[in-house]
Image (tube, rainbow, N blue to C red):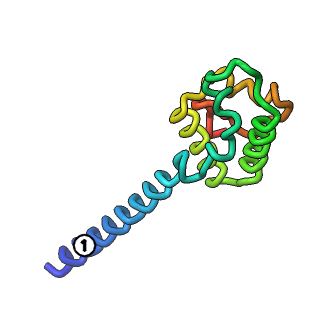
Amino acid sequence: MAAKSDIHIKSSAALMVLVAVLAATAHRTAAFGCHDMQIMGEIEACKPYLTGQSDKPPSPKCCQQAKGLSDRASATEGHNQWAYCISIRACSNNYGFQGDRAEGLPVLCGYNASMPLSGLGDCAK
C-alpha cells in the first residue's frame, strides 16, 4: 500500500510542477503584447501611413522610428527576439496596419528590416 501512496505523491508533485511551468509560460507569453513592449510608441509617427489614414509617403520621423525599432529587434536574441516579433505582429493586427504598407516600409525608408512589421510576418525565422 505504501508503494501506491508514494506513486500518487510523486504523480501529484509532477503534475503540480507541470501546472506551474505552464502557468509561468502562459504569463510570459501573454506579457509580450503590443502595449507591454510599447511598440506603438516606438513607431507612432508611422501609424497614419501604416493604417492607410494618410496617402502621403512615410515621414522622415516615421522612417527614423521604424529603423530604430528594427535595430532594437535585431539586437535581441533567442526567445526575446521571438517575443519582440510577436509584439510587433500584435501591434500590426491591433492597429490595422495594411500588410503591403508594412512590408514596403523598409524599402521606402531605406533600411533592411530585421523582422516584418506586418501581422503576417513569420516570427520563426
Examine the image and state in which quarter residue 122 appears: top right
Residue bearing mark 1? 7
Foreground residue, 68 or 46?
A: 46
Horizontal side of residue 58 vs 94, given as left or right: right
Say what amino acid the circle numbered 1 marks.
Ile
Q: Residue drawn 78% across and 47% down?
A: 71
Foreground residue, 11 or 88?
A: 88
- When the figure is inspected, residue 86 is found, relative to residue 29, above or below; the finding is above
Examine the image and state in which quarter residue 80 appears: bottom right
- When the figure is inspected, residue 69 is found, relative to residue 117, above or below; the finding is below
- Name, please, the residue furthest toward the right: 110
Horizontal side of residue 93 vs 113, given as left or right: left
Horizontal side of residue 111 vs 97, given as left or right: right
**Residue 28 picture location, percent across and down:** 49, 57
Circle 1 Cα neighbour tier, 10 Å, few/some/many (<14 / 14–19 / ≥20): few
Numbered circles on residues, count = 1
**Residue 32 picture location, percent across and down:** 54, 51
**Residue 16 picture location, percent across and down:** 32, 68
- Name, please, the residue furthest toward the bottom: 2
- When the figure is inspected, residue 85 is found, relative to residue 36, above or below; the finding is above
Foreground residue, 45 or 22?
A: 45
- Name, please, the residue furthest toward the top: 55
Q: Residue drawn 78% across and 31% down?
A: 59
**Residue 51 picture location, percent across and down:** 61, 26
Q: Residue drawn 37% across and 63% down?
A: 18
Q: Is mark 1 on a helix, strand or loop?
A: helix
Horizontal side of residue 11 vs 75, given as left or right: left
Q: Residue drawn 81% across and 26% down?
A: 107
* Quarter of the image that includes the N terminus: bottom left
* Quarter of the image that includes the C terminus: top right
